[in-house]
Image (cartoon, helix red, strand yellow):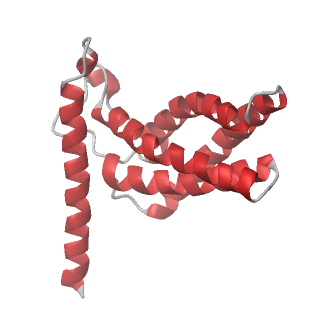
């Protein structure tokens, strides 16, 4: 039984290492000198978000247009499910955290609540109330969300992540505290 657990853990670690290597390679070929300022984890976060955001929008559309739920309830359910997926993918692939899940989930919950009321529910319903299509309103709110969530995940939720990013030490000004 122990060997099976160890094998699974090794496979998970290998997936994270492969994802990290792909992100590091992608950063190296960014144009306009961006390779010097964009960390691989930021690109990894963007890649994962490019998966979870369409999931969020699809669930929102199903709940609101398909099931005819009220917009705030639809936003909430879609956001919670997509955020759970984002947490799992970022923990295992991008930040490769090995910290205890309980305290991380507690920090992530606080981050989500602040993001939810500030960016997701507030901006989305506000723009929709002004007449913007709810899907476009949610897309607009995602810009605010992306900046906040990357910073919060990088320096609050996954603060235990290894300091050296994919074999490249962080510049001294960007090292974790």
Residue 127 is situated, as x and y percent measured from the top left of the image, at 76, 28
Q: In the figure, 67 relative to 8: above or below?
A: above
The residue at the point 33 percent across, 58 percent down is: 98
The answer to whether residue 65 of the structure is visible from this angle is yes
Q: Is residue 156 left or right of residue 167?
A: right
The residue at the point 78 percent across, 36 percent down is: 125
Front residue of 137/168: it is 137
Residue 35 is situated, as x and y percent measured from the top left of the image, at 24, 21
Residue 151 is situated, as x and y percent measured from the top left of the image, at 48, 33
Q: Splitting the image into 4 quarters, where does residue 29 fall?
A: top left
Q: Splitting the image into 4 quarters, where does residue 135 fall?
A: top right
Q: Is residue 52 left or right of residue 63?
A: left
Residue 39 is situated, as x and y percent measured from the top left of the image, at 30, 29
Front residue of 123/10: it is 123
Direction left: furthest residue:
167
Front residue of 131/115: it is 131
The answer to whether residue 96 of the structure is visible from this angle is no
Direction front: furthest residue:
66
Count the marks.
0
Quadrant into which the C terminus falls: top left
The residue at the point 79 percent across, 30 percent down is: 126
Q: In the figure, 71 relative to 106: above or below?
A: above
The residue at the point 84 percent across, 31 percent down is: 129
Direction bottom: furthest residue:
1
Quadrant into which the N terminus falls: bottom left
């Amino acid at each position: 039984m122990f060997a099976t657990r160890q094998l699974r853990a090794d496979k998970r670690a290998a997936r994270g290492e492969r994802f990290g290597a792909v992100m590091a390679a992608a950063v190296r070929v960014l144009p306009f000198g961006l390779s010097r300022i964009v960390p691989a984890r930021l690109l990894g976060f963007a890649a994962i978000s490019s998966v979870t955001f369409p999931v969020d929008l699809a669930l929102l559309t199903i709940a609101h247009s398909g099931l005819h739920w009220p917009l705030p309830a639809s936003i909430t359910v879609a956001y919670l499910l997509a955020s759970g997926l984002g947490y799992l993918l970022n923990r295992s692939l991008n930040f490769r955290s090995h910290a205890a899940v309980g305290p991380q989930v507690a920090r992530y919950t606080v981050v989500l609540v602040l993001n939810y009321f500030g960016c997701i529910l507030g901006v989305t319903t506000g723009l929709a109330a002004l007449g913007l299509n709810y899907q476009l309103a949610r897309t607009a709110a995602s810009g605010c969300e992306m900046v906040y969530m990357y910073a919060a995940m990088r320096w609050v939720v996954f603060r235990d992540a290894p300091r050296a990013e994919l074999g490249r030490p962080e510049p001294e000004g960007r090292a974790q505290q």
